[in-house]
Image: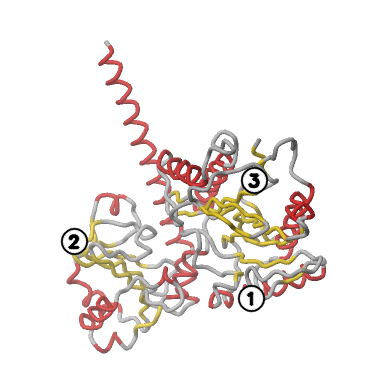
Amino acid sequence: MRYLLTFFALLILTSSFSQEAHRRWRKMNQIRNDKFDLILPEVMKENDIDMWIVMCREGSFDPLYPDLGEGYVGSTGYYIFTDNGSDRIERAVLGISGYLLKEGGSYDYYGSEPELKKYVEERDPERIGLNFSKSIGGADGLSYSGFLELAETLGKKYEERFVSAEKLVSDFRSRRVASEIAVYGEACELSYTIAEKALSNAVITPNVTTLEDVAWWMKEELHRHNLESSFGMPSVYVTSLRGVIATSNDRIIQRGDVIMIDWGVGLMNMYTDMKRMAYVLDEGETRVPPGIQNAFDQAVKVRDIIKKTIKPGVTAQKGEDTVYEALTKAGFNKMKGFNQFTDIDKTDVIIGCHSVGNWGHGVGPSIAFFNPVRLGYELKPSNLLSIELFAYTKVPEWGGKKLRVPLEDDAIITSRGVEWIYPINPKVLVIK
């Protein structure tokens, strides 16, 4: 009887796994088909690209491989998108096959790799977009040998029509459809729930638990929920009056520590990026010390100003300028560079509101000093942004030294401005 019960338990477990896998696959198909129908036509026209060819080799897939439906690549294969003047982009796959790819219903034609030259000649595109880029890794999937092969296969006539699809890739990935936002919200819920539990007594015992214990617990949660991450090991770190003193190592978490987490999860090709902050109560303490609480409150004020200030329809650079103007007017000091805080009695601030989505650091318009090219891209409704900031405020309990408070949560740009997708970081978490 015991073996029979075990058999049925395994049968139920296997069934639940297959149902979850099928659910996720259906959602990803919905996203792909929605983006092909709604986003791809407008971005190909805006970027003046008549045909977009994405090459994949076995063992060397383009970064957009999950977006385009994956499939089995025996040697070399191509996803090909052609703007023939209609409202719908023609879609073909050559040299890529598989049940899941075909059942996804995204493509009009499935052919073989040797058909490429004839396929291109029949459509005779004026500008052929290829995935090579100096500034965006996600748009740089075409290898040098792949470029040479395409040039040889298609001939000099079409080689002279090759252009970078850098901006096309950025626009295609960063403009979101409703089905995509729904999945991103699901990923965010998992991300903050795991992070907040990690910074609690359910995981941490002061003077016993190490930073890497917390990080490995979070990695195990990724495994348990069948999630990914684009950041490797979660960053679990201690900040003191000397700055960051330890990150995800064997340093034991002690009473009086200020602990931060910086991490994200990956679910159905959507990746989050967020931070959380906690304080470990010292002996005799019942709440967060006033100076540390004030530093957090100042960071929240900065976050509120950022949220109210960012609007669509301008370049990310204009958005950054406008945010700093508003922060300066409110009494905050703009830092000259990251970690270049001052001794003045103002809160020093630097922002890095970067694109998120298909990685923790996405490829779309970015209000961040570390994405200079994408500072020139226009902010559009449906872009996903990490509202990230670092605020440095003096803490009396630290002899007037400044505490760096990092806040980061993910949001969407709408016609109204910035809107949160999930419950954002509300407070300094307390570990007793």
Q: Which mark is residue 278?
A: 3
Look at the numbered disc 2 and give the secondary structure of its residue. strand
Image quarter in which the C terminus is found: top right
Instruction: State how far apart marks 2 and 3 are (Cα).
Output: 50 Å
Provide the residue designation for mark 2: 74
Quick one: 178 or 306, which is closer to the camera? 306
The percent position of residue 59, horizontal first and vertical second, equals 25, 62
Quick one: 93 or 235, which is closer to the camera? 235
Using residue 190 as the reference point, say whether residue 346 is left or right of it: right
Q: Amino acid at mark 1?
A: Gln
Q: Amino acid at mark 2?
A: Gly
Provide the residue designation for mark 1: 317
Residue visible at 34% across and 51% down in the picture: 104
Tell which residue pokes out farthest to the top in this image.
1
Is 93 situated above or below 264?
below
Instruction: Give the quarter of the image for residue 332.
Output: bottom right
Instruction: State how far apart marks 1 and 3 are (Cα).
Output: 33 Å
* Closer to viewer: mark 1 or mark 3: 3
Q: Amino acid at mark 3?
A: Ala
Instruction: Give the quarter of the image for residue 35.
Output: bottom left
Binning the other alpha carbons within 10 Å of mark 1 as few (below 14), some (14 to 19) or many (20 upward) gives many
Image quarter in which the N terminus is found: top left
